[in-house]
Amino acid sequence: MARSRRPSAAQRAAEKAEAQASARRAVRICTWASLVTGALGILLVAVPKLLPAGGPWVQLALGALTLILSFRARAIGMRGVEGFDGRLSLLGAFAGFGIMFFAGQAAFAVLSAIGH
């Protein structure tokens, strides 16, 4: 008799559990990385004297990285994690938007000063 190549219910459950664990790990890493980059960006927005040369550009890069990481965490969490909460990644997204807003104003001021 030929054996069926379909995985058993136990194998499917094990694969699903492994996929859940992998997704949770990815969400955790992306979320905490977005919070760290958000905290650094907020610190640079609040105290711009810490990085006098290239400050607005570094702030913009940190804001963009924060947004990318937080939205990536939300996407992975909504697709691959049952019962995904997502409040921390939402906090990271809000921080990223704030950083981009204030750093964008500073960058625009720098570009305007160069133009005049």
Image (cartoon, grey):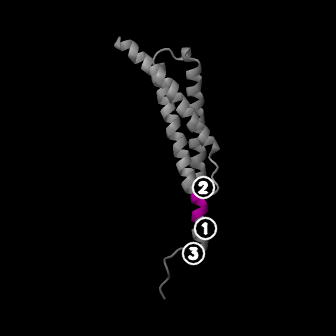
23 and 70: which is toward the camera: 70
* Mark 3 residue type: Ser
| Residue 19 lies within the magenta run | yes
Number of the front mark, 1 or 2: 2
Please tell me which residue is depicted at 58% across the width and 70% down the height of the picture: 11
* Residue under numbered circle 2: 81
Disc 1 is placed on an element classified as helix
Spatial CA span between label 1 and label 2: 14 Å
The label shown at residue 8 is 3
* Residue under numbered circle 1: 13
Q: Which residues are magenta?
A: 15-20
Please tell me which residue is depicted at 49% across the width and 39% down the height of the picture: 68
Spatial CA span between label 3 and label 2: 22 Å
Q: Which part of the image, by quadrant, shows the C terminus? A: top left
Spatial CA span between label 3 and label 1: 9 Å
The 10 Å Cα crowd at callout 1, few under 14, some 14 to 19, many 20 or more, is few
Please tell me which residue is depicted at 57% across the width and 51% down the height of the picture: 77
Disc 3 is placed on an element classified as loop
